[in-house]
Amino acid sequence: MKKSALRLSPDRLRIGLAPSFVSVERERGFLRKAIVDRQKLACDPGFGAQLWDGALAALKSCDTRLRATVVLSNHFVRYAIVPWTTGLDTAAEEEAYVRHYFARVHGERAKSWVLRWTRNGDTRLASAIDQGLLEALKLALPRLVSMQPYLMAAINGCSDFIPKTGAWLALVEDERACIALHAGGRWRAVQNARGAWLDLLERERHRAESDVPQLALIAGADPGAAEGWTFQRLQGGLSH
């Protein structure tokens, strides 16, 4: 009886995983969800051989029997805008094509990465994570039902805020920012790097090949004001 009740539990964990912290929200309900608990666990990014080892150790304090959705810090993810081509008829051919693109930039290590990419358009926004991280997450969270890179999760949440004229998206974390440009109805550029987010944003604007929007949607930082920009702050973030 007790085991059956656990399977039917409406509770679910939403976890933000970063090198220096793990944020955990416990949601309850099937149709109308409510957050019944929220916590942020500090962890040591220098713990263990891998950057994520400290965060995974912190997960041991969570109720890992519950279904879990994980959003991965951009510290753990690589991104690319992949020019698409015709003649890719199967999922295996698409994966080989995307993997070859990453390998051109990152070398042989890309052969073991787990890849995801958008499905429409003449360019595709692709992400890559280490296979070891995915396997470690599955062991730590036996009921893992979803895992998303932070950029992909943010795009899903902010699509209604991007006008037809386009916008920049800046996801700000400790010592890192991910900058992406949506213009002309597609994602045109992405840069995931260390550094101050406004400096990275300015650099990407100067690298753009044509006129680009002045609107930038910012998550994880107070945007303030800067000449030539219109900033709009997004609610939430990796640490909620």
Image (tube, helix red, strand yellow):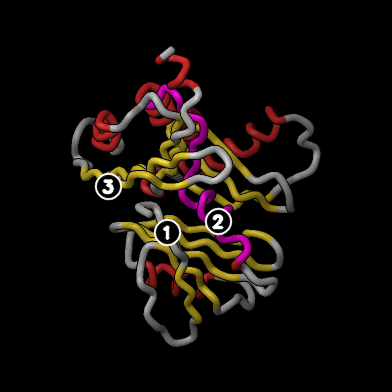
Task: Name the residue beneath numbered marker 3.
Answer: 40
What amino acid is labelled 1 in the image?
Gly
Please tell me which residue is depicted at 68% across the width and 60% down the height of the picture: 186
- Which mark sits nearer the N-terminus, 2 or 1? 2
Image check: 146 left or right of 37? right
Q: Tell me the magenta residue range.
A: 141-160
Callout 3, which amino acid? Lys
Question: Which residue is outermost to the front?
Answer: 1
Query: In the rendering, at what x and y percent does residue 57 appear?
Result: 25, 31
Q: Is residue 142 magenta?
A: yes
* Label 2 – label 1 distance at C-alpha: 10 Å
First reached walking from the N terminus: tag 3 or tag 1: 3
Label pair 2/1, CB-CB below 8 angstroms: yes
Kind of residue indicated by mark 2: Gly
Image location (x, y in percent) of residue 5 = 45, 20
Label count reads 3
| For marks 3 and 2 on the same chain, the one whose residue lies earlier in the sequence | 3
Relative placement, left or right, of 213 versus 39 is right
